[in-house]
């Protein structure tokens, strides 16, 4: 296991090795000669092209990473910093030395627990010469920081999934709920699911998903009813599920809903399943539908979730990232760490080969998009939103199964 400090030291001292999926910090050993092979008669064997060696005279590009490194979200932020550090290391390790035109310096900043904390460290990063900001995590913090980054002419690649904060020079890199619902709606319609019920938390996220689902299914002539909103407590969830069950029992079989879209995850999802099991709804006849919140290995062991569907990035890419991360740091990353990896890979990849180290917005928004090591294909849009083709995954006892693959390019 290698620590974050070792990784940063390795970068600082230019000991950047060629990256690989199992041990990104180890320089590959020279291949052995096959049995019976003869040495060359004249000269030496050709050398392996140099990679990752940063010339001494290239310009320095400072990239600030704003993640929570203290408080209740400290574990999230620490994993994201680890992922970003690994991404920067791998970006150099994958680049021929003669193509390296800049030295990217990572400036980790603790965005703390409030928007004021984020604003304080963002100001600090700008004063220290940061020309690009990756982060912060929460949209409230993005809104507070945006005026100062705009004034300084600095681009911000945020981890937010709230497209309301997107603007020119302020990009949302999170998985947007609107796109998740659109993908799920398209799939359900093609599977002839005509009647859908909804259980959603009574908050901005729950209402947004419900509104988008109604719009997407409505234009396809599909009913979204009944819909029940609940406050986040077992008692309120019980009441909402009871109302849903009453609606289910009061209509003829050919009018009963065929699926329940559950806009929640974690402990609240478990509370919902407990409440559903108390009702007369036969879950074997109902398809459970969710969002990317269900991209959680804990759900694999819950029998009621087997057969449930949700949209997410292709799982194979994330699993490759997870294995590499675990090899380097000795622990499994949280899901959000994958966003930090892909974000830093994008920024570093552009900066490293730029003659003046400039991270050009035209390159960021290349309409062909980029293939992230952790989450596969994506692209940033000029208006600040992002687009990600998503797969439809089924929860099974042995893992997440792709039942409808994501598209592999943005070409129409």
Image (spheres, rainbow, N blue to C red):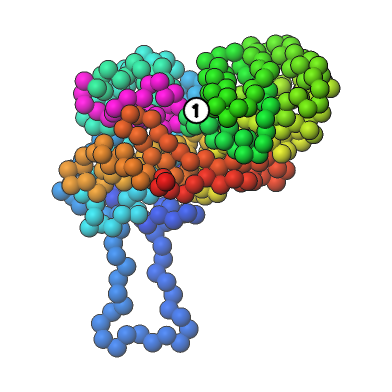
Q: Is 72 left or right of 148, judged from the image as shown?
A: right
Q: Is residue 77 visible?
A: no
Along the line of sight, the residue nearer the viewer: 21 or 294: 294
Q: Residue furthest front?
A: 221
Q: Is residue 125 visible?
A: yes
Q: Is residue 167 magenta?
A: yes
Position above or below: 115 against 340: above
Q: Position of residue 287 (x, y in %)?
A: 71, 33
Q: Residue furthest left?
A: 57
| Residues shaded magenta | 151-174
Number of residues whose C-alpha sits closer than 10 Å to that of mark 1, classed few (under 14), some (14–19) or many (20 or more): some
Along the line of sight, the residue nearer the viewer: 31 or 384: 384
Residue 126 quadrant:
top left
Q: Residue at x 61, y 24 (%)?
A: 263
Position above or below: 143 against 82: above
Q: Position of residue 85 (x, y in %)?
A: 39, 41
- The residue under label 1 is 178
Q: Is residue 262 magenta?
A: no
């Amino acid at each position: 296991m290698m620590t974050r400090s070792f990784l940063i030291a390795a970068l600082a001292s230019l000991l950047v090795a060629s990256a690989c999926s199992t041990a990104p910090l180890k320089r590959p050993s020279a291949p052995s000669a096959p049995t019976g092979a003869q040495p060359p008669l004249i000269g030496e064997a050709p050398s392996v092209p140099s990679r990752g060696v940063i010339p001494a005279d290239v310009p320095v590009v400072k990239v600030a990473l704003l993640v929570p490194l203290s408080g209740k979200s400290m574990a999230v932020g620490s994993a994201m910093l680890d992922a970003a550090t690994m991404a920067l290391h791998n970006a150099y390790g994958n680049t021929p030395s003669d193509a390296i035109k800049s030295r990217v310096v990572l400036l980790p900043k603790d965005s703390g627990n409030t928007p004021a904390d984020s604003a304080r460290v963002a100001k600090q990063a700008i004063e220290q010469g940061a020309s690009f900001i990756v982060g912060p995590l929460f949209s409230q913090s993005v809104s507070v920081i945006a005026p100062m980054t705009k004034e300084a002419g600095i681009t911000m690649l945020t981890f937010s999934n709230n497209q309301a904060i997107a603007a020119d020079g302020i990009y949302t890199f999170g998985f947007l709920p609107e796109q998740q619902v659109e993908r799920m709606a398209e799939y359900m319609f093609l599977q002839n699911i005509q009647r859908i019920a909804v259980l959603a938390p009574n908050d901005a996220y729950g209402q947004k998903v419900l509104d988008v689902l109604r719009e997407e299914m409505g234009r396809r002539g599909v009913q979204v009813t009944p819909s029940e909103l609940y406050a986040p407590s077992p008692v309120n969830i019980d009441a909402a599920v009871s109302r849903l069950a009453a609606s289910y029992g009061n209509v003829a079989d050919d009018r009963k809903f065929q699926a329940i879209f559950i806009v929640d995850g974690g402990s609240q999802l478990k509370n919902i399943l407990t409440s559903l099991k108390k009702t007369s709804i036969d879950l074997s006849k109902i398809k459970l539908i969710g969002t990317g919140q269900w991209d959680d290995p804990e759900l694999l062991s819950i029998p009621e979730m087997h057969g449930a569907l949700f949209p997410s990035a292709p799982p194979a890419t994330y699993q490759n990232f997870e294995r590499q991360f675990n090899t380097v740091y000795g622990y499994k990353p949280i899901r959000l760490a994958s966003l930090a990896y892909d974000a830093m890979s994008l920024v570093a990849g552009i900066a490293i080969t730029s003659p003046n180290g400039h991270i050009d917005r035209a390159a960021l928004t290349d309409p062909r998009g980029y293939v992230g090591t952790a989450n596969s294909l994506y692209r940033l849009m000029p208006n600040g939103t992002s687009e990600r083709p998503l797969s439809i995954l089924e929860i099974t006892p042995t893992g997440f199964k792709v039942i409808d693959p994501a598209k592999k390019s943005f070409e129409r």
